[in-house]
Amino acid sequence: MKPRLPVETGVAVILLAASAWLAITFPTFRSGATSYVIIGNASEIAILAAGMTLVIAAGGIDVSVGSVLGLCAIVLGKLAGEMGWSIWPACGASIGVGVACGLITGTLVARFAVPPIVATLAMFAAARAGAYVLSGGDSISQLPEGLISLGYGSLFGMPYTAWVAAGVFVLGGLVVRRTSFGRGVLAIGGGRTAAFLSGQPTQRIETWVYGINGLLAGLAAVIVVARGATAIPDAGRFSEMTAITAVVLGGTPVTGGQCTMTGTTLGVLAIGVITNGVRAYGKGDIWVLLVLGCALLVAVEVDRWRRRERRRTE
C-alpha cells in the first residue's frame, strides 16, 4: 500500500502557491501590514469554519450561520448601542441568541429528523428576517468605544480577533481529539445508526453540534460589529459559503466521519489570501464570490477523488 499524504497537503500547496504568486506580482503583498489585514479579516470566517467543521464531521450542513450572525449582530447593536447595556452582558446576550438558534436547528435535525439542509434553510430565512425586523432595515452605528476597540486592538503584533480565532481552533481540536463528545461527533458522521447502537447519545450530541455552531456564529458577530464599528442586518451574507468552502478545502470530507481543524485553518488562510488577491487585481465582490464558488466545486471533487482512491487502495 502506498503511503498517503496528509489530507492537509493540498490546501497547504494552494496557500503557498497563491502567496508566492501574489508576493511576486504585488510587492506590497510581502509587507507585514498586508499579513496583518489578511489575518484580521479572516478571523470571522475562521470562527464560523471551526463550528462548521464539527457540523460537517457529524454528517450535517448548516447554511444558516450567516443569517444567525446577522441577527446576533443586530441584537448586539441594539443592546450595546441603543439600550446602553454594558459591553460584556450585551456580547453574552448576543452569543446566547446564536446558541438558541443553533439549538432550535439541532432539535429539528436530531429529534424530529428534519434533513439538515431543510432545517438550516428555515433558520436561514427566519434569522435574516428577524435581523431586518429588529433593525427596521437600518444599520446601528452608535456603539460604545470599548466595543469598537475589541476589533482593532492587538497583542504581540496580532489582532485580538486573531487570538480569539486561534483559541477557538485549539479548543476545537482538543474537543475532537480528546473528548467523548468529539468521538461521538465523528461516530455520528460515520453512521448515525451504528453510533446509536454503540451507545452514543446521538440526539444530544447532534443537537449540541448545531448549538456550538450557533454559539460561534454569535462570537463571530461580536467580531464583525467591533471591526466594522456598526451593526447591519446584512452582516454575514454569504459567509456560510465561505466557511463551508474553507472546511472542505481543508480536507474534511463532505460525507462526515472525519475532520481536520488544522486543514480548516489552512483553508481559511488560503481563502483569505485568494480573496485579497482577487481584490488586488481590482475585482469586486462578485468576482470574489465566483472564485469561492469555483473553489468549493474543486474542493468537493477533490474530496470525491480522495475517497475513491482510498477505497481502491484498501
Image (tube, rainbow, N blue to C red):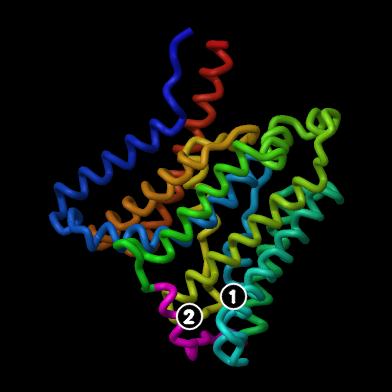
The residue that label 1 is drawn on is: 91
Residue matched to label 2? 147
Q: Are marks 1 and 2 in contact (CB under 8 Å)?
A: yes
- In the foreground, 94 or 159: 159
Where does the image place residue 299, in percent across and percent down from the top left?
47, 38
The x, y position of residue 227, in whole percent, is 42, 73
Amino acid at the residue labelled 2: Leu
Residue at 47 percent of width and 57 percent of height: 165
Residue 3 higher or lower than 105, as above or below? above
Residues at marks 1 and 2, CA–CA distance in whole angstroms: 9 Å
Dot 1 amino acid type? Cys
Looking at the image, is mark 1 or mark 2 earlier in the sequence? 1
Q: 34 left or right of 192? A: left
- Considering every residue shown, the one lying at the far front of the view is 156
Magenta segment range? 136-151
Q: Quadrant of the C terminus?
A: top right
